[in-house]
Amino acid sequence: MLREMEISRAIIEAYTGELLESLSLDVAIVGAGPSGMVAGYYLAKNGAKVAIFEKKLSIGGGIWGGAMGFNKIVVQEEAREILDEFGITYKPFGKGLYVADAIETATTIASKAVKAGVKIFNMVEVEDLVVKNDRVAGIVINWTPVLMTGLHVDPLTVEAKFVIDSTGHGAQISQHLVKRGLIEVPGEGPMWAEKGEELTVEHTREIFLGLYVTGMAANAIAGAPRMGPIFGGMFLSGRKAAFEILEKLR
Amino acid sequence: MLREMEISRAIIEAYTGELLESLSLDVAIVGAGPSGMVAGYYLAKNGAKVAIFEKKLSIGGGIWGGAMGFNKIVVQEEAREILDEFGITYKPFGKGLYVADAIETATTIASKAVKAGVKIFNMVEVEDLVVKNDRVAGIVINWTPVLMTGLHVDPLTVEAKFVIDSTGHGAQISQHLVKRGLIEVPGEGPMWAEKGEELTVEHTREIFLGLYVTGMAANAIAGAPRMGPIFGGMFLSGRKAAFEILEKLR
Amino acid sequence: MLREMEISRAIIEAYTGELLESLSLDVAIVGAGPSGMVAGYYLAKNGAKVAIFEKKLSIGGGIWGGAMGFNKIVVQEEAREILDEFGITYKPFGKGLYVADAIETATTIASKAVKAGVKIFNMVEVEDLVVKNDRVAGIVINWTPVLMTGLHVDPLTVEAKFVIDSTGHGAQISQHLVKRGLIEVPGEGPMWAEKGEELTVEHTREIFLGLYVTGMAANAIAGAPRMGPIFGGMFLSGRKAAFEILEKLR
Amino acid sequence: MLREMEISRAIIEAYTGELLESLSLDVAIVGAGPSGMVAGYYLAKNGAKVAIFEKKLSIGGGIWGGAMGFNKIVVQEEAREILDEFGITYKPFGKGLYVADAIETATTIASKAVKAGVKIFNMVEVEDLVVKNDRVAGIVINWTPVLMTGLHVDPLTVEAKFVIDSTGHGAQISQHLVKRGLIEVPGEGPMWAEKGEELTVEHTREIFLGLYVTGMAANAIAGAPRMGPIFGGMFLSGRKAAFEILEKLR
Amino acid sequence: MLREMEISRAIIEAYTGELLESLSLDVAIVGAGPSGMVAGYYLAKNGAKVAIFEKKLSIGGGIWGGAMGFNKIVVQEEAREILDEFGITYKPFGKGLYVADAIETATTIASKAVKAGVKIFNMVEVEDLVVKNDRVAGIVINWTPVLMTGLHVDPLTVEAKFVIDSTGHGAQISQHLVKRGLIEVPGEGPMWAEKGEELTVEHTREIFLGLYVTGMAANAIAGAPRMGPIFGGMFLSGRKAAFEILEKLR
Amino acid sequence: MLREMEISRAIIEAYTGELLESLSLDVAIVGAGPSGMVAGYYLAKNGAKVAIFEKKLSIGGGIWGGAMGFNKIVVQEEAREILDEFGITYKPFGKGLYVADAIETATTIASKAVKAGVKIFNMVEVEDLVVKNDRVAGIVINWTPVLMTGLHVDPLTVEAKFVIDSTGHGAQISQHLVKRGLIEVPGEGPMWAEKGEELTVEHTREIFLGLYVTGMAANAIAGAPRMGPIFGGMFLSGRKAAFEILEKLR
Amino acid sequence: MLREMEISRAIIEAYTGELLESLSLDVAIVGAGPSGMVAGYYLAKNGAKVAIFEKKLSIGGGIWGGAMGFNKIVVQEEAREILDEFGITYKPFGKGLYVADAIETATTIASKAVKAGVKIFNMVEVEDLVVKNDRVAGIVINWTPVLMTGLHVDPLTVEAKFVIDSTGHGAQISQHLVKRGLIEVPGEGPMWAEKGEELTVEHTREIFLGLYVTGMAANAIAGAPRMGPIFGGMFLSGRKAAFEILEKLR
Amino acid sequence: MLREMEISRAIIEAYTGELLESLSLDVAIVGAGPSGMVAGYYLAKNGAKVAIFEKKLSIGGGIWGGAMGFNKIVVQEEAREILDEFGITYKPFGKGLYVADAIETATTIASKAVKAGVKIFNMVEVEDLVVKNDRVAGIVINWTPVLMTGLHVDPLTVEAKFVIDSTGHGAQISQHLVKRGLIEVPGEGPMWAEKGEELTVEHTREIFLGLYVTGMAANAIAGAPRMGPIFGGMFLSGRKAAFEILEKLR
C-alpha cells in the first residue's frame, strides 16, 4: 500500500541529507546557465565537491529560447569538442558554424552534470556572499519565492573554498562586492559577436580572492562586448574556470 | 571571421524549416511535462511524426520542484522500468519506492525525447483547438509572451491526426471543448496517492475523437484523486497513450 | 569561533526533525488564530500530538488589529476564565465586558501553546485535504511563498486523525470539500454580535468525518451572523473542539 | 477548400523571406513615428534598402492622439509641401498654420511608405546596437512581448550601414551609447514651440559614426526645447536625414 | 511667430467642431478593425453620416500582427475585389489565396476611409448603449484612459440611427444587451477556417433593432467557428452591413 | 422631452468655451490644495484672470484626511482671519489654536474660490512648463488618466504671465526646472511645526522669473521644516503670493 | 510656542468625541455623492442625528468630472429649486436645462451639509450591515486603506435607526443583503436619460426594513435606465428619502 | 444583552486613552523586532515611559521565519541569560550554541514586554522625525495602510526624549537624517557571523543627539557585517541601549 507519509519522508530525508552534505563545499556555483553547468561538470568529474545554486525552478539560463524564441543555437569550431563531450547533436552551417537544438543542449548538459556528481539546488537564490578577511568564503542562500514575495525571512549560509558567478549579464553575485565598493563592474558593451566570444574566455578569472566569473558575467565585469545566440564562448569559459580552480584546490 | 548576420540566418532557417515541417503532424502533444514527454518519446521512437508545444521556456512541468522545493521525486515499483529505459539514477526507499533526483529526471527525459526525434516548440501556447466535423483536427498556437501581454495578435494553426492534452491539473486543452459544451470536466479530487496513481493510468484515453488526455489532466477530466510528488502514474500514462495512438495510426 | 555552517546545521536539523516527527499527527490544526491556538493548547496539554499550520509568517489571525487598528479586544463574562487560564491582563468595561490588549492576547496565547507542546509550522499553507474512504485523513502542505508566486511545485502530505479548520471567515479548508460537492457552505451572515457569539460555540462541530470547524469558520459553515471584535466565542469554540476530539481520540 | 495549414504556410514563408532579406540593410530605422516613416519613404523611393523596426504593434508614434486626445495636428507653412507629397488633406488656420486629421496623417504616411518599398517589422524592439571598430554597424532585435514579460531569451542581429534613431523623446537607441559613455544626451528642454521646430531640423545629424537622430530624438540629444502637437519639424527632419544618408550611400 | 496658444486653439476648435457635429449620426460604428473600417468606407462613400469610435489610440484591430507577429495576412479569391477597391498590394499563394502586408492593409483602409468622409474618434470607449422603446438609439462614450484608471467620471451620449458592433471576438457592445437579458451570445466556436469565413458573412445582420454585428463579433454572436489570420470574411462582412444599412436609411 | 444629445452639447460647449477662454491667463495655479485655492480666491477677487489646474478629480489636496484620517485640522491665531474671510466654523483649543472640520474647510474654500471667478480644471496634469527667453511663460497640460496609463499622447499649452507651484511636498512644477539645471531644490526638512509655519510664509516667493511657490512647495524649495496638520501657514502663503503677483500685474 | 503634541491632542480629541457621539445615529448615510449629501442636508436641517460615511478621502461621488472630464453638469427645470436652496450658480441652456459648474456644485453642497450639522466620516468604508430580527440596525465600518491593502483587521459597528444606501451604480450596501439572499438587485438598465430621471425619484424607497436607497443605487435596485451627466434626479431623490425618513422618525 | 455599540465604545476609549497618554514619551522605539522589544522590556521594567511603533500588524520582525522558513533560531553562550530572563525554552547544539523555537521566542518576548508596561502601536508607521535645535525630539506617525495606498493624509506627531531606531537592515528611521545630510549610513557589509555579532553590540549607540540605533540597524549604520539567523547580538544590543538611555534619563 502506497502511504502518503512515506513519500513525504523519502523526499525530505533525501533532500535534507544532500543539503547538510553541501553546507561545506569546494566550489559553489551560482547560476545553472551554460557556463556554470559546464564548469560544474568538469569540476565534479575531476573529484571536486561542487553544487550549483539556481534561482529559477528550471536550469538552462538563456539557452532555451535560442534567439527570439527560434529555439536553435549556434556554436563555432573552437567549441565543437564540448558538444562532442556531452553528446549533443549538431549540423554544420556555412564555414565553421554549427547549429544545435536549444532544448537538447540545455537538458543534455544538465543531465550529464548531475550524473557526474554535481548537486543542483534550484529555486534557491544567493542573496549575499560570506566574506572573511578579504576572501570570499561562502554564499548566503534563501528560497527564491521568499525573496520574490518580500517576506522578512533570514537566509542560511553555505561555506565554499571558491564561488563561481555564472549569473549572466547582471553578474549578480559580483554586484554584492560592487555595492560595498570592493570591486567595480563596468557592465557589458554593445554587440560584437566575434570580439565578445574571444573576450569571454579571456576575462574568465578570479576577480576577487575566492570569486571566479564565467560566461556573460565575465564580459560584464570587464566591459567587453555581448555576442548574442552563439554559445561556444560560454562553454569554453566554464571549462577554463573549472580547470583553474581544480589546480588551486590541489 | 564570425559574422552576426550568419548566426541570425542559421537560427532563422533551422527553426523555420522545422516549423514548416511540423504544420502537419501525426500527433501534437500539448505540455512538456512528464506524461507528455514520455508519450512523445515512445511515439517518435516508433516512427510517428510528433511535436510537443510547451508554453513555458523550459520543459519539465511539475517535476523540477520535487515537493515543496525539496527537489527529489518518488517512483513506485510498477514504473521502475521506465526509469531504466531512460537511464535515470534512483535509490530504493522502503518497500517498493524509489527516490530520484528531480533535475536529473526532467532533463534526462527531455534529452532522450529530442534525440528520439520529438520536436519541442517552447514558449508557444496552444490557445484553441481545430475541430472539424466533430473531430479534433489540430491546434491553434501563439507565442506565450504575446498572450501574457494581451497583445491583439492572431494565432497560427497546426494540423494533427491526434492531439494529446498533457497540461496537468488544469486540463487546459480539454477546457476549450468544455467551454463549448462538447465535454464535461469535473476537476480532480482531493489527495489519495494510491488511488490517484492507479486511476491516472486507467483514465488515460481518447475523451473526444482525436483528443487524448494523459497524466494529471486525465485525472482532472475524470474527477479522480490527486497523488502528490509520486511520478510512476505519469510515466505509465504517457506510455499507454503513445501505444494506443500508434495502434490507431497504423 | 562562531562558524556559519554550524548555525545552518543547527537550524536545519532542529526543523527537519520536528517536521519528520509531525508527518503523522493526532490533530492537524489549520490557522493559528484565536480558536485554533486555544484548541491546540488544550489538546497538547492533554497529551495529543498536535501541530498548527499557519500560512502567514506570524500567528494571531485577526487579533492584532483589534478594531480598525485600535488594538484592543473585548471579551464577555462567559470566556473570562480562559483569559485567566492564559494569564492575560484585562479591565472591566460596563456590565459583563472586559477589555484586553490585542498584542498581549495574541502573543501570550501563542507563547503558552508552544510551551504546552504544540508545534507551529508558519509560512506553510494547506492547499488541499487527504480524503480516503470518505474520511479526512490528512492535509496537503506547501510553502506559502511558493503558492503566492504561482510557481509550479508539488506539495507534501501530512497524515492526521483529525483536522481542525480554524481559518476564519473563509473556512478555506472546508472549501476543498465544498468544491468537490462533499459539503455545503452558506457563508456567514450580517453582523449581530450577540447571536454570533452564541452560535459560534453551537456550530463548532465535526462537519465531515475527521474534519472539525472552529471560530468564524464554524459560523461561516452554518450561515450564522458575524460578531466583530469580541473574542469570547472564539476561545470557547477552540476549547470545545479540543475536548470533543480528545474524547474521540481515547 | 480552405486549409488552415496553407494559410499558416503562406504567412510564415512570406514573413521569413522578408526577414532573411532584411538581415543586411542599407538603413535600419528604429521607430515608426512621423520622422522615421518620412525618412524611410524618401530612402526607399530613392533606391536604398531600408526597414523600420517598431516596438509597438501599430505605427504612428505620437501622432494618433493629436493633443490631449483631440485628434488633430498642426503643420506650419514650411512643411506644407510634405503634406502635399503624401496627399494628406489639410485646412488653413490663421496665418501659416494648417490643421490635419491625426489618423489620416498617420495612416497615409505609413501606407505610402510601405508602397514605396519600406519593410516595417512591428512588435520588434531594438534592445541594443552592434558597434564594431567605433562604428554603429547594426541593431540587436527581439520580440517586444518577450522583453515586456522579462523572459530570458536572446536576441537576433541585423547588419546595417546606417541606423536612424527616430524613437522620440527618450532617444532610446542613442541611450545604448550613452550608458557605455560613448556619447552624452542632455535630454530635451522645456516647451518652446518656435525654437523647438527650428532646432529639430538643425539637430538632425550623424551623432556617432553610422548613427543618425531625427525628430524629438534629435532635440533630446541636443537639449533643445520640446514643441508640442506641431509636426512640421518632424517631417522635415526625416527628409533631411534621408537625403544626407542617400548622399553617403553613393 | 509660432504661438503655442494658436496651436492649442486650432486643435481644440477643429476637434470640438467635429465632435459636436457627430453627436447625431446615421451610423455609429464601434471598433476600427477591418470589418468596421470597411463598413464605414462604403457608408461614407454613399452619403451616410458615419463615425467610428475606437478605444485604442491606433486603428486596425487585429490586422497589425498578422499571425504570431509574422505581419502578413491572407485573403481568399472571393474578397480580392475589396483589396483592389482599396489599392492594396498582394501576391498569390497557391490556389485562390493571396498574401498581403498587414501594415499596408491596415493603414491603407484607414487612410481611404477617412478620405471618404468617415470621422474616427480614437481613445474613446463605448461603455454602454442608449436603448429607447426597445430600439438601440445611440452610444454612451468616455475616454479610454478614464475607464482604464477606474476614475469615477460620467460619460457623454451620441445619438445614432444604427450602431454597428465591430469589436471582434468579445462582441463587447452586444454584451451590454446580453447582461440585461435582451439578447443571448453563445461565444465563438473552435477554429475551422473555411466554415468560419462562410459564416461570418452569413451572420452579419441586425441582431436587435438598430444594432448590427460584423466580423468576428458576428461569429461570436452566432456561435460560429473562428478562422484565424484570413481576412476575406471580415471585409465582405463590413461591406454587407454597409449596404443593408444604406438600404434602410433610405 | 429630455434629449441625451442636448445634455452632451450643453456640457461640451460650456467646457470648451471656458477652456478656450483660459488659453491665455494672468495666473496659472498648479494644485488645488489650501495655498493654491486661497491664492486663486484673492487673485480672482481682485480682478486677475486666473485658473487652477488640479491633477486629481477632487480639489483639497492634503486637507481631507486631517491627521491619520482623523478629519480635523488646526489653525493658529495668525491665520484666524482667513477662516473668518471664508466663513469656516472653528472651535478654540488651548492657547491660540483653533480646530476646524477638514471637510468643511476644503469644500468651503473651493466653493468660495469658484464663486469669486476662479476656473478650476480638474483631472488635468501639468506635465511641463513653457520657458521662453529665461522666463516661465506658461504650462503644458494633459489629461491625468492619459499620463497615468502611459499612453503616447501629446499635450496642449496654456500661456500665463505667472505660474504658481502649489503642488505640495514634491514641488512638482519646480522640478521641471530642477531637472534642466535651472534651479535647485533641497527638499523639505524634518518636522518642526513652529519653524515650519513661520518659514512657509517667508519662503513664498518668485523663485524663477514668472514662477511662484506657495505652501509646502515653498518649504521644499527652501529646505525648511515640515509642519504637519496645521494649516495657518498654507493660507497665509497663498494670500501673500496673490498680493505680490497682483502688484506685479499692475 | 506651537507644540506638536498640542496639535495632535486637539485633532484626536475632536475626532474621537465626534466618533463616539456618532456610534448611535438616527440615520447613517453611506456615500457622500449628490443624493447622499442632499439627503443628509435636509435630515440635519430638520433635527435628525445624521452622519455620512464615505470610502474616499473626498466627497462628491461622480459630480467632479462632469462628463468625460468636461467638468460641467446639467440640471433640469424640476430640480432648479434645489440649486437655489444651496446657492449654486447656473446658466440656462435651451429649453428647461441649466448648466452648472461641477466643482462649485460638489463643494457647495458639502459645505452647506456640514454647516447644517451633518458629520462626514471620510476614508471610512462600510463593509457590512448590522441586521437584527430582520431589520437593518446599523453599519459595520473600517478604514478604507485597511480594506484596500487586505490587512486582516476587524471592523467597528455603528447603530442607526435608518441606513441610506447612496453608493451609486453598484448599490454596494444593498449588495450585503443580496449576497445573503434577502433582496434581489437586477442592476441598472441601458442609458435613457428621460426615463432614468423620472424613475430615480420613483424608486427612492425603503427596500428592506431600515434600509433606503437613493440616486443611482435606487435605479440599480429597480433595473431602471441610467441617465448620464444630468443631476436633477439625484437631488430630488435625496430630498425625498430625507422627508420620508423624517416622517418615520417622528 | 450584548450591544455592538458598547463593544465599539470600549475599544475606542481604551485605545484613544492610551494614544493620548503616549503623545509625550521618555522613549519612542521604532520597530518591534528582537532588539526593539528587548530594549522596551528593560526600559519599562525600570520605570521609563516607553512605546513601540511597529509598521506591520504583527510584532517580531525577522524572528518568525528562522532561516529559510525553518523556524528555529540560534543563540550563543553570551546571550543565554536573556533567554533565561524571558523564560524561553532552548536546547544546546555543539559548543556554545543554543537552538530555540522562533515562534516561542517572538511571542514570549512580546508578551513579557507588554506585561512590563510597554505600549505597542502596531500598523503605525514612522514616516519622519521631529528635529528641533539639532536634537531628535519625536516621531511623525501615520497608519501603515494609508502610506501603502499612497493616500494623501497628513501624519500626527509624538514627542519623545529619546528615539530608538530598531528597524533592522534598512535603518529606516536613521535614513530620514541621511536624506537631509545630517548623518551618513554606509549600509551593512557581507555576511560574517562572528564579527557581525560582536560589532552589533559595539555599534549600539546614540548616533545623533536623541537617536539610538540597535540590532541590524546599528550594523547598517556602521557598515559592519551581517550575521544571519543568530540572535544573541540583537538581544544584547537592545539591553545595552536600554541601560544607556536609563542612565541619561536620570
Image (cartoon, coloured by chain):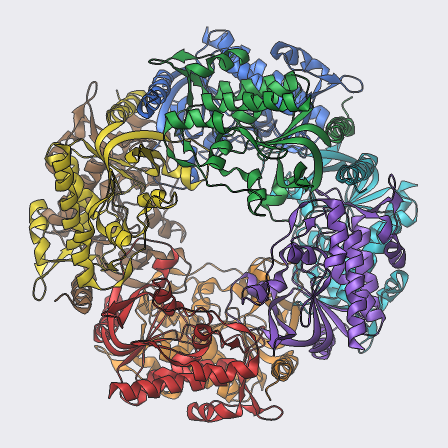
Chain colours: A purple, B cyan, C orange, D green, E blue, F yellow, G brown, H red
Q: Is residue F113 above or below residue D76?
A: below
Q: Position of residue G11 (x, y in %)?
A: 18, 63
Quarter residue E129 falls in: top left
Question: Position of A250 compared to E156: left or right?
Answer: right
* Residue F55 seen: yes
Q: Quadrant of the C terminus of chain C?
A: bottom right
Q: Is residue B206 above or below residue C169?
A: above
Quarter residue H27 falls in: bottom left
- Give whichever of H206, C164 is nearer the camera: H206
- Give whichever of D65, F99 is nearer the camera: D65
Q: Position of residue H170 (x, y in %)?
A: 44, 68
* Residue E213 seen: no
Quarter residue C149 falls in: bottom right
Q: Position of residue D244 (x, y in %)?
A: 59, 23
Q: Quadrant of the N terminus of chain C?
A: bottom right
Residue at 62 percent of width and 61 percent of height = A172
Q: Position of residue D65 (x, y in %)?
A: 44, 28
**Count of residue discs:** 0
Residue at 55 percent of width and 22 percent of height = D240
Q: Is residue G81 above or below residue F80?
A: above
- Give whichever of C116, D173 is nearer the camera: D173
- Give whichever of C248, D76 is nearer the camera: D76
